[in-house]
Structure formats: structure tokens, C-alpha cells
Amino acid sequence: MMSTLKPKHRPFCFSVKGHVKMLRLDIINSMVAAVFMIIVSVLALLPETTTFIVLGGVFGLLTAVCCIADGVLIYRKLLFNPSGPYQKRAIHDKI
């Protein structure tokens, strides 16, 4: 009886498609977090303005800016290098 060779099975989270989908989810997560932080920071600044409330609102807005920057950087990574850090061929083929 001749057995056929099965293709190499790689778990989804370690495949290139899995990596790209996880990065897309990270972009969505960053944008949702940024919108949430902007809403919370603006609402914190509205009622009364004491020193600590203003500091909390400013740090919340700073956090939102960092979340937006995170999403933009991940989007650029996906745009310019969608396959990730995986090598297409073995290192000894280059020599």
C-alpha cells in the first residue's frame, strides 16, 4: 500500500495569513481604544476643572494619540511588508 505525503500542517496563528489577520485586528483594537479614550477624556474635562481632572484629560488624550500612532504604524507595516518576517527560502540558498 502506498501512502501519500500530507502537506506540512502549520497552525493558523503561525501562518502568514494568520499573522496578517491578527495585525488587522490589532489595528481595529487600536482605533476603538483611541475613540474610547477621546470620549472619556473630553467627558472628564467638561464638568469641573481641577488640576487633577485636567491632568487626567490631557493624559487620556495623549493615550488616544499613542493608540492612533500604533494603528498607523501597524497599517504601514501591513502595507509595505504584508508577509511579515518570514523568509521565502532557506538562508543557504543565498550563498
Image (cartoon, rainbow, N blue to C red):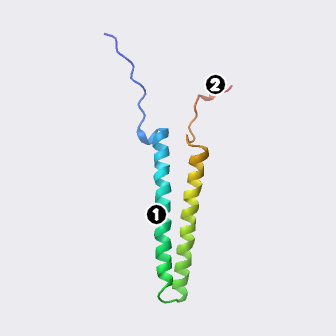
Q: Is residue 59 above or below residue 6?
A: below
Front one among 57 and 31? 31
Disc 1 designates what residue?
32
Q: Is residue 10 above or below residue 30?
A: above
**Name of the residue lying farthest toward the top:** 1
Q: Earlier in the sequence, mark 2 or mark 1?
A: 1
Front one among 90 and 72? 72
Residue at x-position 48% and y-position 44%: 19
The quarter of the picture where the C terminus appears is top right
Disc 2 designates what residue?
93
Question: Residue 42, position in %: x, y?
Answer: 50, 78
Question: Residue 41, position in %: x, y?
Answer: 50, 77
Residue at x-position 53% and y-position 68%: 64
What amino acid does circle 2 point to?
Answer: Asp
User: Is 14 left or right of 87, judged from the image as shown?
Assistant: left
Dot 2 falls on a residue whose secondary structure is helix
Question: Residue 88, position in %: x, y?
Answer: 57, 31
Image quarter of residue 82: top right
Tally of marks: 2
Dot 1 falls on a residue whose secondary structure is helix
Q: Is residue 71 above or below residue 10?
A: below
What amino acid does circle 1 point to?
Answer: Val
Question: Residue 2, position in %: x, y?
Answer: 34, 11
Cα–Cα span, label 2 and label 1: 44 Å
Q: Which mark is residue 51?
A: none
Instruction: Answer few, some or many: residues within 10 Å of disc 2's Cα (few below 14, many 20 plus, some between 14 and 19).
Output: few
Residue at x-position 46% and y-position 63%: 32
